[in-house]
Amino acid sequence: MARRNDEATSPSHLATHPKHAGKAASSFLLAMTSVPPAIATTSNSAEQPPAPAWRRYLPLLAKIAFMAGALGLVARHLDLPALARTLRHARPAWLAVATALFVASKLISSVRLNRFFRAIDLMLSERYNLRLYWLGMYYNLFLPGGIGGDGYKVYLLGRQFPGRRAAIFRALLLDRLSGMVALLVLLLGLFAGTSYPGWWRVGALALVPVGLALSYGLGRWLFGEFRGAFGRTSWQALGVQGPPAAPRRT
């Protein structure tokens, strides 16, 4: 009796017995055509309505509004008629030369800063670093203190390189200090060409190598991780500060 029941309920019996063949076929078709609940739920949740197009332009509009407000704030403190008179009497050729020298100095300064970054294993492309440098200049011009751009770099790079904010701050500080040393060297060199007594000029020239040696030694002591970048960055600092520090002819 048990054997007969097993045969009646076996898969082969269900498939071949005329009484159960229709039920087996209908169950198979239902299983093949039905959608699992999890897949159906996922497909329904993925079909979200698209966001309004105007939301994509909100960050751009906010930036434009901020820039317009900053320019308006600066314009309030300018003597616009005097500025217009100065521009009318300016020589376009010299303005073009000054602009080219200014842009060249900023390009050199960007490369110099990137050498400091690479000395601490922050491998930034020159293109990305240049964009970051221009953004830093923008914040330096429109934020009080003249160091807002450096703070922005520390914040942004600190997010990209967690745990490296102290090293990034030291790189930016050394970049500033190297520029100040270059200005001091140029100042002493220009002082030697003035009409002051001879011993003043000789003393100014003598201070140039002394100051360079002192700054190099202090730099290697206080900023040891940047030793490999001192040589080229020192010459680049002179190139950055050189064009703006040239004497003006009236």
Image (cartoon, rainbow, N blue to C red):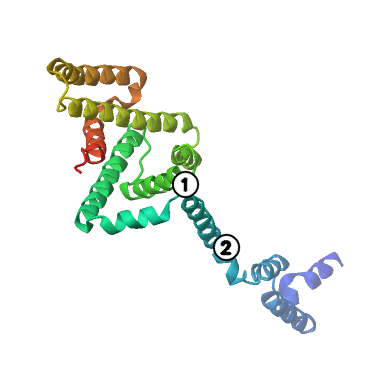
Q: Is residue 219 above or below residue 154?
A: above
Q: Please give the name of the residue rendered at 26% of the width and 40% of the height, measured from the top-left corner.
A: 244
Q: Is residue 182 above or below residue 27?
A: above
Question: 75 and 166: which one is in front?
Answer: 75
Q: Label 2 sits on what residue type?
A: Leu
Question: 45 and 91: which one is in front?
Answer: 91
Image spot of residue 230 (x, y percent): 26, 27
Q: Residue furthest right?
A: 1
Q: Quadrant of the C terminus?
A: top left
Q: Please give the name of the residue rendered at 24% of the width and 28% of the height, measured from the top-left corner.
A: 187
Q: Please give the name of the residue rendered at 81% of the width and 66% of the height, measured from the top-left corner.
A: 3
Q: Label 1 sits on what residue type?
A: Phe
Q: Quadrant of the N terminus?
A: bottom right
Q: Is residue 118 left or right of residue 32?
A: left
Q: Residues within 10 Å of mark 1 (few under 14, many from 20)?
A: some
Q: Is residue 39 above or below residue 229?
A: below
Q: Is residue 135 above or below residue 204?
A: below
Q: CA distance from mark 2 to mark 1?
A: 22 Å
Image spot of residue 166 (x, y percent): 46, 29
Assign a secondary structure to mark 2.
helix
Q: How many marks?
A: 2
Residue on which disc 1 sits:
142
Mark 2 or mark 1, which is nearer to you? Answer: 1
Assign a secondary structure to mark 1.
helix
Q: Residues within 10 Å of mark 2 (few under 14, many from 20)?
A: few
Residue on which disc 2 sits:
58
Image spot of residue 213 (x, y percent): 22, 18
Residue 229 appears in view = no
Residue 225 appears in view = yes
Image spot of residue 51 (x, y percent): 62, 69
Q: Earlier in the sequence, mark 2 or mark 1?
A: 2
Question: 186 and 44: which one is in front?
Answer: 186
